[in-house]
């Protein structure tokens, strides 16, 4: 009697090493489309700004922090936390531009920001503020601060469009020495959340899955990863 077949032997999987693929935050790594062209142009024009205070506002994953990092490097800016704008940051504004990244409503040092803006205006330096929300939604209560914010230049960054998402996804794969087929990119941009952070997460998971299974990144694998991400998000929403 022959031996009973209880199943095929599992195909061995390669566990990928955690080598890390840091995201480039320089100007050469920035992909520009209609969604972020105004913001990119503003960063490129510094120090020829028409106002000393600029606010970049846009949704999560739209690239605000990337643009802020480019500007901070170019301007050699000091960086302050939105919740605690201390005397050192205000003093730094005498000679250096200042960046405050990620302002959230209800978590803003209003007095510190008011004095910082005054210092920037007096010294002739620059201040860049980024947020998911327009300044009027920051719930500032100081009338003088509200007046200063209304005088700032406001630049809105839209959700990533198809051109930007496709360029970012292609570049993220290229950074990992992976040549991705255009039809796979088109499949992804039609189905993932429209944010650069989600694009980065999808690329990382696809790269890892391909290494584990020693397989190419195909549309079928992309569909599997997108479905898994959607299922995970649905569980979080419950």
Image: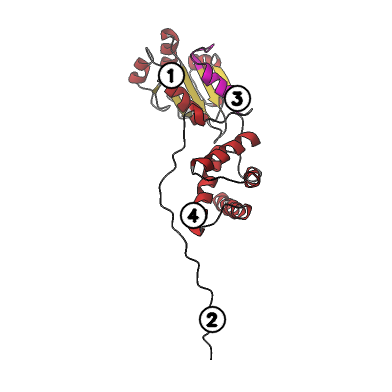
Please state which of the two labelled residues, at mark 2 or mark 3, is closer to the viewer.
2
Q: Which residue is mark 1?
A: 75
- Looking at the rendered structure, the secondary structure element under dot 4 is helix
Mark number displayed over residue 5: 2
Answer above or below: position of 50 versus 26. above
Q: Magenta stretch containing residue 45, yes or no?
A: yes
Q: CA distance from mark 3 to mark 4?
A: 36 Å
Q: Earlier in the sequence, mark 3 or mark 4?
A: 3
Rendered residue at 45%/27% (across/down)? 69
User: Which residue of the protein is positioned furthest toward the bottom in this rendering?
Assistant: 1
Q: CA distance from mark 4 to mark 1?
A: 40 Å
Please state which of the two labelled residues, at mark 1 or mark 2, is closer to the viewer.
2
User: Which quadrant of the view contains residue 34?
Assistant: top right
Would residue 80 be found to the left or right of residue 174 on screen? Answer: left
Q: Which residue is mark 3?
A: 37
Q: Which residue is mark 4?
A: 211
Q: Earlier in the sequence, mark 1 or mark 3?
A: 3
């Amino acid at each position: 009697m022959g031996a009973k077949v209880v199943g095929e032997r599992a195909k061995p999987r390669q566990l990928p090493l955690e080598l890390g693929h840091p995201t480039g935050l320089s100007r050469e790594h920035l992909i520009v489309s209609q969604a972020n062209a105004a913001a990119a142009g503003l960063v490129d024009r510094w120090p020829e700004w028409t106002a000393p205070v600029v606010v970049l506002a846009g949704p999560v994953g739209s690239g605000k922090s990337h643009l802020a990092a480019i500007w901070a490097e170019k301007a050699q800016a000091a960086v302050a936390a939105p919740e605690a704008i201390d005397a050192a940051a205000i003093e730094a504004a005498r000679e250096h531009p200042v960046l405050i990244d990620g302002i959230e409503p209800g978590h803003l040092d209003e007095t510190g920001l008011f004095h910082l803006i005054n210092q920037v205006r007096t010294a002739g330096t620059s201040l860049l503020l980024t947020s998911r929300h327009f300044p009027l939604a920051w719930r500032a209560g100081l009338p003088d601060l509200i007046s200063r914010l209304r005088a700032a230049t406001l630049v809105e960054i839209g959700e990533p469009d198809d051109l930007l998402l496709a360029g970012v996804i292609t570049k993220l794969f290229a950074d990992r020495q992976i040549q991705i087929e255009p039809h796979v990119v088109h499949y992804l941009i039609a189905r993932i959340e429209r944010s650069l952070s989600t694009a980065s997460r999808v690329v990382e998971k696809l790269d890892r899955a391909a290494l584990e299974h020693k397989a190419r990144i195909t549309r079928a694998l992309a569909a599997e990863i997108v479905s898994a991400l959607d299922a995970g998000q649905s569980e979080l929403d419950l």
